[in-house]
Amino acid sequence: MFNKVYLLITGPKSSLAKKIIKHLDKKKYSIITFDRKKLNLRNSINVKKVFSSELKLIKDKKVIFINNAFEIGPILNFRNINTNLLGPLITANIISQSIMISLLEKKVRNFYIINISSGAVFTKNKKLSIYTLTKNFIHNLIEYLNIENDKNFIKKKRYINFIPPSFFSKMNQKLIRYNVLKNKKKIKKPDIVAKNLIKLIESLKWD
């Protein structure tokens, strides 16, 4: 009997996640989604409880975690951001995501983590300081984990930063309205990005 790969994905209502779920071969992959109602990233205790519960059921399976959900926060210069928002945004974008990655490492033996990163980690855009800095943290964490686990996962990069091109999404539409994202001609359809990511998923090698 063919053993399905379990694919966990946060932010399933995003344009990219919808296309991944649409095009992924359901005969090969069993999909577990975490939307905002199920997983409140601003509540790290909730994240630990919910994510741990799901992992217990699949700890002996092949697992891919697509870390997709992320809060962009206010599109403002740092000095204009309400300080009451800093804690919740850091919890959502750094603490909760670090908890999920750590839990997966500890509870599942055979896994891959694909972090949906961003070209923003290599740029310095006005009004995107919180988004860029927190996105950068998780991007770098993924790179550090590959270094730390090199001896354990020889020749297998278990931690992957997937950096998509700009594509049509609610976030990018918002950035266009705020005149932060200006080159509209280079924006791709989410179908194209999703299919490229699926190619990556299907190329992964398992123990």
Image: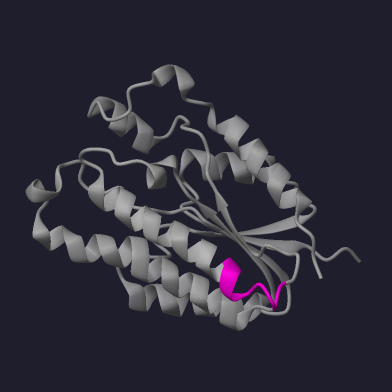
Q: Is residue 40 left or right of residue 206?
A: left
Residue placed at 23% from the left, 64% from the top? 88
Q: Position of residue 3 (x, y in %)?
A: 83, 66
In the image, residue 26 sits, relative to residue 150, either above or below, namely: above
Residue 142: image location, x then y, percent:
52, 63
Name the residue: 70% across, 47% down: 200
Give residue 9's quadrant in the image: bottom right
**Highlighted range, magenta:** 146-153
Q: Quadrant of the N terminus?
A: bottom right
- Is residue 175 found left or right of 98 in the rendered image? left
Residue furthest to the right: 1
- The answer to which image quadrant residue 172 occupies is top left
The C terminus appears in which quarter of the rendering?
bottom right
In this rendering, the answer to whether 133 lies above or below 18 is below
| Magenta stretch contains residue 99 | no
Residue 170 rendering spot, x and y as whole percentages = 37, 35
- Predominant secondary structure in magenta? loop
**Residue 53, position in %: x, y?**
53, 79
- What is the image's colouring? one colour
Position of 81 with respect to 113 (left or right) is left
| Quarter occupied by residue 20 | top right
